[in-house]
Amino acid sequence: MFSRIQTIFLFLVAIFMFASLLFPIWVKKSSSNKVSAQMNAFTLRYEKPNEKPQTTPVFYIAIAAIGAGAMALYAVLRYRNQDKDTKTALYHQIRFSMIISLLIMVTISLMIFFSVQGDKWSSGSTRGAYQIGFFCTTLALLANFLASRFIRRDYNLIKSMDRLR
């Protein structure tokens, strides 16, 4: 399985999802009233001058990102010898790819939801900007789409070979 292109894409999914845990997801800084808000995968932090910073846990993002990354790694490492039952292995790969896509979409939805909340908390004319953590997640979604496409192509090739027998 390590020699196939879908394995590389699934491995990239895992790397991007775990990278989204390390980098900031969304930042808003207002120069006029010195209000700032920053979100990573674990907390949304809101700061006003002369006030204690407020933090809100947003660990749901981290849970979904860890789930998607772990599922991608599991899909990569699950099948070492695919020659035994290639049809079943590819079927499971398709199923894993669907679950990974769902987890990535949940992660992106949570990121957008909490960034909108952060925008409401920190009033001002400027809008927040998405950072590298958000874009890592969107790249993971793209890599998972490509992996799914190559998995389906292999599955269709195997089905067509069975018809020829």
Image (spheres, grey):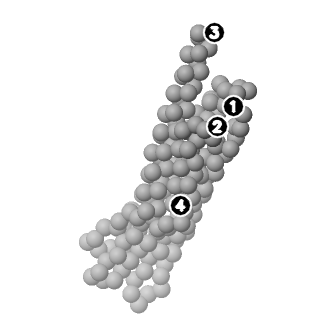
Q: Quadrant of the C terminus?
A: top right
Q: Please rate how many residues cluster around mark 3, counting C-alpha atoms within 10 Å: few if below 14, some from 14 to 19, many from 20.
A: few
User: What's the amino acid at mark 1?
Assistant: Gln
Of pointers 4 and 2, the one earlier in the residue sequence: 2
* Left/right of residue 126 with respect to residue 36 in the rendered view: left
Marks 2 and 1, the one that precedes in the sequence: 2
Q: Badge 1 local density, few (<14 within 10 Å), some, or many (20+)?
A: few
Using the numbered discs, state the Cα–Cα distance from disc 4 to disc 1 in whole angstroms. Answer: 29 Å
Q: Are marks 4 and 1 in contact (CB under 8 Å)?
A: no
Amino acid type of the residue that numbered disc 4 sits on in the rendered structure? Ala
| Label 4: how many Cα within 10 Å (few below 14, some 14–19, many 20+) | some
The percent position of residue 4, horizontal first and vertical second, equals: 58, 37
Give the residue at x 69% y 31%: 82
The kind of residue on which mark 3 rests is: Arg
Quick one: label 4 or label 1, which is nearer the N terminus? Answer: 4
Which residue lies at the image location 38% right of the left edge and 63% below the top edge?
130
Q: Percent x, y for residue 59?
A: 57, 63
Q: Is residue 73 above or below residue 56?
A: above
User: How far from the left and from the top, in percent, is residue 90?
Assistant: 62, 30
Question: Which numbered tag is attached to residue 19?
Answer: 4
Q: Which residue is mark 3?
A: 165
Comparing 159 with 113, the one in front is 159
In the image shown, does 144 or 82 lie closer to the viewer? 82
Residue 94 visible (yes or no): yes
Q: Reading the chain from its start, which is encountered first: label 3 or label 2?
A: 2
The reply to whether the C-beta atoms of the residues labelled 4 and 2 are less than 8 Å apart is no
